[in-house]
């Protein structure tokens, strides 16, 4: 997407009554659902004294750390800094746009739920991940490639970490 497209989208959201607040609320709720689901997964595994708990936590945590390091190394510019506009979601960070860590987190957590056989929770988390991806692009904090790469890396890390070894 280019500067004109981002400005058109963010200006359109701002023109709607409570548009910014609605987008921020959707981002906040979808993100909280993902992280609350993660805690629920830990509780489920802990209650069942399941040996999958260590892998559930380790794969998501190690993947998150690796993605954070790669992100810092790539240091991709964000749309709002590249095109000089105010994003809908409050953000002051100048780089580290790709991959989107919010979207990555949702997708690796969704994969974690598939691993433990909690398919309905996995689907809910994947849907929230898609919502987060859309919201973060239309709010101007990520480019489409950032969220696509975040989702794909989350899925890939999940396949490798949960289903390969």
Image (cartoon, helix red, strand yellow):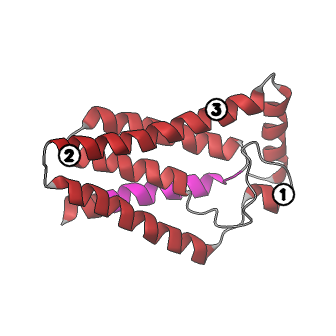
Q: Is residue 154 magenta?
A: yes
Q: Residue at x 80, y 39 (%)?
A: 10
Please tell me whether mark 3 or mark 2 is closer to you in this view. Answer: 2
**CA distance for labels 2 and 1:** 45 Å
Residue 94 spot, x, y in % from top left = 74, 65
In the displayed orientation, state which residue is furthest to the top.
17
Q: Is residue 143 magenta?
A: yes
Residue of label 1: 83
Q: Main secondary structure of the magenta part?
A: helix
Is residue 41 shown left or right of residue 148?
A: left
Residue of label 2: 45
Instruction: Name the image quarter holding residue 35.
Output: top left
Is residue 100 shown left or right of residue 106?
A: right
Q: Earlier in the sequence, mark 3 or mark 2?
A: 3
Q: Residue at x 80, y 62 (%)?
A: 82
Label 2: which secondary element: helix
Q: Around disc 2, counting alpha carbons within 10 Å, would you say few (fewer than 14), some (14 to 19), or many (20 or more)?
A: some
Q: Residue at x 18, y 54 (%)?
A: 52
Please tell me whether mark 1 or mark 3 is closer to you in this view. Answer: 3
Instruction: Name the image quarter holding residue 21.
Output: top right
Residue 155 spot, x, y in % from top left = 37, 55
User: What segment carries the magenta color?
Assistant: 141-158
Please tell me whether mark 2 or mark 1 is closer to you in this view. Answer: 2
**Residue 25 badge:** 3
């Amino acid at each position: 997407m280019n500067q004109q497209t981002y400005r058109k989208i963010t200006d359109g959201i701002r023109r709607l009554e409570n548009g910014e607040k609605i987008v921020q609320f959707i981002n906040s709720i979808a993100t909280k659902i993902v992280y609350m689901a993660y805690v629920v997964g830990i509780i489920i595994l802990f209650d069942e004294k399941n040996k999958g708990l260590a892998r559930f936590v380790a794969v998501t945590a190690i993947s998150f750390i690796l993605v954070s390091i790669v992100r810092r190394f790539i240091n991709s510019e964000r749309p709002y800094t590249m095109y000089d506009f105010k994003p809908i979601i409050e953000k002051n960070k100048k780089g580290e746009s790709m991959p989107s860590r919010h979207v990555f987190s949702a997708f690796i957590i969704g994969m974690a739920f598939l691993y433990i056989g909690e398919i309905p929770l996995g689907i809910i988390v994947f849907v929230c991940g898609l919502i987060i991806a859309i919201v973060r692009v239309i709010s101007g904090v990520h480019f489409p490639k950032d969220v696509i790469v975040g989702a794909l890396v989350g899925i890939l890390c999940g396949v490798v970490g949960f289903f390969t070894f």
